Amino acid sequence: MATLDSTPVSGCAGTGTLRLVRLLYAVTLFLSALLLFVVQPMFAKMVLPQLGGSPTVWSVAMVFFQAALLCGYAYAHVIVRSLPLGIGAIVHLGMLAAAALALPVAIAQGFGTPPTDGIALWLIGLMAVSIGLPFAVLAASAPLLQSWFAAKDHVRACNPYALYAASNLGSFAALLAYPTLIEPFVSLRLQTQLWTYGFAVLALLIAGAALVVARRSSEPTADHAAGTTARGRAVWVALAAIPAGLVIAVTAYVTTDLASAPFLWILPLALYLLSFIAVFRDRPWIRPDTIMRMIPFAIAPLTVGLLGGQRPFWLALVVINLAAFMLLAMNCHWELYRRRPTPNRLTEFYLWVSLGGVLGGTFAALVAPHIFPLVYEYPILIVAALLVLLGSSEPSFAHFIREAAPPLILALLAAVAGLVLHIELPGEAELPFQVALVALAAVILMQRSRPARLVGWVVLGFVLTGLWQPGLDRVMAVRSFFGTHHVEETSNGQYRLLYHGTTLHGAERVVDRAVAASSSPEPLTYYYFGGPIAESIEHVRAAHGGLAHVAVVGLGTGSLACHKRAPEQWTFFEIDAAVVRIARDPRLFNFISACAPDLPIVIGDARLTVAASLQRYDLIILDAFSSDAIPVHLLTREAVESYLMRLEAGGALIIHISNRYMELGSVVAAVGATEGLVAYIKQDGRRQPSQLDFKTNAEVIVLARKPDDLGDLPHRLGWREIKPRPDVEAWTDDYSNILGAILRKQLGI
């Protein structure tokens, strides 16, 4: 959290003693901010394997961190307002000592396996017990140190807000260092040890700063003249809540299809912090009127692309999302800075701003998933951020209504057509629909000087793209801790589809808009007969003369259940209970009810449930995805070790690694080599577009202890042995290189 900037006080003294005091406080603030921003991704990564690698883990973690920040700021505000400086310093040192008892940072004992419901509250409780006290005390240090430095004797000598740069330098050092220097090279165990040493050094520095305070007899002058109204405080809260909610929404958007990892978590968080630094000053880096002129150029493509289906130009969309977020956050934070109180009310201001952060984060991470079937909170927060543009430009609410009325009326009519009249668009309407969206983006750009009209057209764009994807009719939508699931039906009534996020996770042919009653429905998408997954299953089966027990990680629509043969015993491991309900419902999909009605399904994260299984398997199939992202913790060396413990001698491990964004074959090969496994890979070469029959090209890698365990598979057309690359290290729970996997895929290296 950035602090207030200020014009330097004239006659700033430069005595040697004062320079040493300033250096002490600057170093202390730097280290405090560094530790605060390192512990966030460090602990979230620590708990990630227990929760399926879901992007929601970081969203919920952000809410916890914001709440702990609020507690720290409230504590600092009470200390500053209620106690003399010296006594307040002693109290804070006592709190630091108490917090040290909770170190080193580790997952608290006694929480056991995560529940199938209420995971968010379970995670918040886990984090509160594990790191709640150290984090809150650490968060309180920044406002306390600034208030101590602002004691009357110091203010006469120099501007206390000069410490602003040191605090933010520490924050950025942490955000830049964690994904580039810490995560790839330092194990989690060593990270926690180093963090503990850093906390001890910080405590010593704070003790030194407290000693300086205790030797001062003067107190900061209270400001009783400049009161703040309830409306003013409410505006502070709102202006802080909008970007706080947006940072969670945009992080979830970026990580849903790629991977949930600190490398991607930190990008939006860094921009969030940067937005404070850029505008929390009398001379912002970018003029507010320039920000307002730039916003439409980022919002226009976002309006027509945010709620669409596939994301073929994912990198461009990520860049646009981050740019739009940065501009909207800067605009909100500039308004916040413009409405700041005098420095003597600094801790109160931080308290209300922190409350706004908690409310915004709670809405995006905890409330929205329970009230919206899809990620509607993101466009809602974008519209709320755009409304901030109206703060200084619209003379009245009536004027806003007159300006925004035309597009808002069109949005209302579209909502009635889609939601009430159930009008759907056939596949033939896709091109005209896309042309209309491009025209809408152009209209938004033409409204740059009319903020109210711009907001109205943006609302219309979100309504249109949220209601319709030409060629698809929505059957149902459901949301869980692990993502959004929506069942669609092609407008010609031939296929029913399951999407998780933006990625197709299964399809079934239907007849007359009812699921076919065939006793043996045909698996489609990646699982079609003759595809690499089916081929690998058949050859492992042939090598064994049949399969006794098979474990499948990831359920989807249950398509793989129709690859089962009697009397084989197949067990599915699925983390999301919502997926189980969808797959078992014969009104939606018929694979399980027709092919394996008594199919056992174990709910929970596969890292835990497969390891806890008492059964040994001839074949383990890893087909776990979150949208298009494979949870990283399921591909690490430790994960493969846990699979091998449950694999019979001569068994095989099939891993589905199809991915639009990351190259994972070399990663799996490297992991397999560390366990002495051979690896064979195949990239499906079907040229027929999947939209014609919904048979999708798959990339599959098969691991075994020796080639003979795979029968004739290594000699089949398209299969090749893949050796570890010298430039690709095996991923572990302590190390993963998401950026490298992305670059290899996108650059073809």
Image (tube, helix red, strand yellow):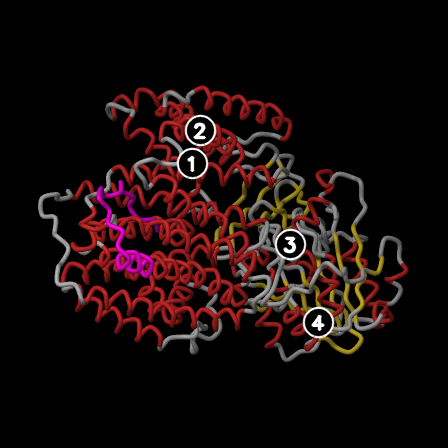
Question: Disc 2, disc 1: CB below 8 Å?
Answer: yes
Up/down of 100 relative to 291, above or below:
below
Q: What main secondary structure does the magenta stretch of the protein show?
A: loop
> Alpha-carbon neighbours of circle 1 within 10 Å: few (<14), some, or many (≥20)?
many
**What is the distance, in whole Å, between disc 2 and disc 4 at their CAs?**
60 Å
**What is the distance, in whole Å, between disc 4 and disc 1 at their CAs?**
55 Å
SS type, badge 3: loop
Q: Is residue 22 magenta?
A: yes
SS type, badge 2: helix
Magenta segment boundaries in residue numbering: 1-25
| Mark 4 or mark 1: whose residue is earlier in sequence | 1
Residue 416 in sight = no
Residue located beneath label 2 in the image: 294
| Mark 2 or mark 4: whose residue is earlier in sequence | 2
Q: Position of residue 205 (x, y in %)?
A: 33, 67
Q: Image point 60% across, 23% down: which residue?
A: 432
Question: Disc 1, disc 3: CB below 8 Å?
Answer: no
Q: Give the residue type that dot 1 points to.
A: Leu
Residue located beneath label 1 in the image: 327
Towards the viewer: 338 or 6: 6
Q: Give the residue type that dot 3 points to.
A: Asn
Q: Which mark is residue 569?
A: 4
